[in-house]
Image (cartoon, coloured by chain):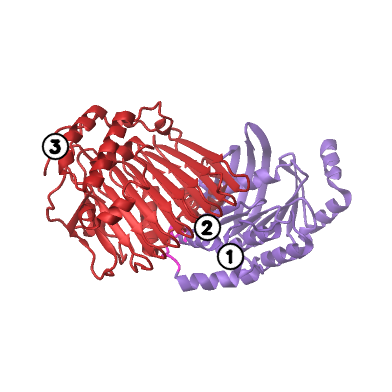
Chain colours: A red, B purple
Amino acid sequence: MITAEKISSTEKLVSDFEAVKKMLPGNSFVQNIRQKAIEKFAELGIPTRKNEEYKYSNVQKLFQENFSQSAIDNSQFSIDKYLIPNLDAHFVVLVNGFFSEELSSLKNLDTTVVISSMQKAFEQHPELVEKHFSTCADINSDAFIALNTAYAADGVFINVPDNAAVEKPIHIINLVIAKESTLFFPRNLFVIGKNAQVQLLETFETHDLPVKAIATSVTEIAIDENAKVQYYRLQNDCENGQQINTVSASQQKNSHFDTNTVTLSGGWVRNNLNIALNGENCEAHLNGLFITSDTQHVDNHTLVDHRKPHCESNQTYKGILDGKSTGIFNGKIFVQRDAQKTNAYQSSKNILLSDDATINAKPQLEIYADDVKCSHGSSTGKIDEDALFYLRARGLGIESARKLLLYAFVNDVMQTIRINTLREYLETLIHKKLGE
Amino acid sequence: MNEMLSIKNLRAGIEGKEIIKGFNLEVKAGEVHAIMGPNGSGKSTLSNVLAGREDYIVSGGEVSFNGKNLLDMSPEVRAREGLFLAFQYPIEIPGVSNINFLKTAINEIRAYKGIGPMEAKDFLKLIKEKQALVELQGSLAGRSVNEGFSGGEKKRNEIFQMAVLEPTLAILDETDSGLDIDALRIVANGVNKLRSADRSFIVITHYQRLLDYIVPDFVHVLYDGVIVKSGTKELALELEEKGYDWIKKEVVEA
């Protein structure tokens, strides 16, 4: 294991960049962007709670620990336990954000489709990198996008060319292996061509992490005209697994983007999901589900930017919170002046199972066009006692009645997952989690 | 014949207010008892207390069901022991399919009795057969529990569930309320087909109308938390004719 010296404060992260920047991949074009990004990060700094976007998520506290930035030698181990039962997929393994050729399996992949490490992509596909790198995720909008853009060492690069359809889902397995507290910066870039189709799945299921880790990741997804992309994420790390991740997608006209973020465990999770609708007739479906317990913290920030007419966005987020856990849903919808005939819907529903659990739900609509349909709704409550009694009066035990009701609550989000084996796997995980 | 249900001097209420004030009733296997009474007499409290609703507090008396102390049992154990309440206002449960819910219920009841889960094909056969009994469309059984059902469909769904779960004692809590005459006939036919020598019914109703279709062995009049008059089906007709004021007057005079 290569270990750099301890890093964590804004100043330290900025000054350390000088030392590591020569080792980071990318041509002068990319190096230029990195330089701008670190300057931006120096200016923005690690956000305090005075920053409205981080009001309920104390990242300062997260960064109080001394973290090392580390890479991993690809030690031999089996990844069988991280595979999803019965899922026939191409799979890619990232260890601490580094692409592992040895552990990945990309057999029978259509030769026109590229799945490689970002390191390789910087060398072998400079034209695609220059066209898309740092275009979907804006370094000026968020300190962690800036930080990641500066430090990004590796990750997954996917290019599905025009008119190609990837038959099997592409499963990205994110593992963390560390013996001391670790901070790392995975960077992914997915370039999906015109009329292309792909199903992407990312899982985070590290269960045996003895020290704290923070993945500060950025995934950019460039979706060209008429393309259809499904992107699913399962976050199920142990409590030492922490992440501040940003997914920024940019859609061109007639494209469809469906995404679903399921968070079942992980000590501290911040998900930023930004979608820019840059062409007419786009559809974006954002669904999310989080089931928290103990002292877990799950923060979902979404931003849908309607920039062109005749687009539709639809988001449903559901949370079930137990113990002393906290959840946040902050959903922003912008409808720009040109974006007439926009349909934008948002719903956030939550169930609190304990008096000590907290949810902050905040919808924000900013509408500058006059011919649009937008709606949002948010509700938070307890489990329905009348329904519970009804089920018990038919012979269901209190625990199975509770489970049935909670499962029913999340069912509509589950039904948006169109890979059956993934949905079945999630169902077993959710039943296990609700049975605790 | 054995006593199936024996209620002795039951006192119960909600939110500190006593509503059932020394209620007595004996129900033998195979009998149908109707309990009638004006609004506020305690009919719904009685059914909720018997089904085990936890916000109702029992302050005195005994209830034995097939020789066991009913009041000691949780709602689910009461159901597994063979008690069924057809709700006055069936609850809508979005996302839970009728079929899944009934399958879970049957299998939990079977597990309680030490029997393994029902075979899928036997379950489907049972569902089909019982649907026909209450003329419930197949599509309703596959939908979420009571979600978007009309009033009549909800009540039919209650009787359908009863038919599937085959209780030994069924309490029908104002099952006739909100039903038009056709729905009433269908519901009553369903109940009549389920009458048998080892199954008893308590039919709680405000109106005599239902008792034209489900003919009771006994009729009791509940007023201010106690039974003030008992008789046979003719009592229901007399009530219909004279109204509840007749009973109230008798109670005051006595």
Q: Which residues are magenta?
A: B108-118
The mark that comes first in sequence, 3 or 2, is 3
What's the CA distance linking mark 3 and mark 2?
A: 48 Å
Which of B43/A292 is in front? A292
Give percent across and percent down for residue B190.
Answer: 67, 66
Q: Which residue is mark 3?
A: A4
In the shown orientation, is residue A230 left or right of residue A375?
Answer: left
Q: Quadrant of residue B184?
A: bottom right
Which of A430/A422 is in front? A422
Q: Which residue is mark 2?
A: A281
Residue A103 among those drawn in magenta: no
Residue A260 to residue B40: above or below: below
Residue B244 to residue A42: above or below: below
Secondary structure under the numbered disc 3 in the rendered image: loop
Do circles 2 and 1 both sit on a common chain?
A: no
Asked if residue B50 shows in the view, the reply is yes
> What type is the residue that disc 1 sits on?
Ala
Q: Nearer the viewer, mark 2 or mark 1?
A: 2
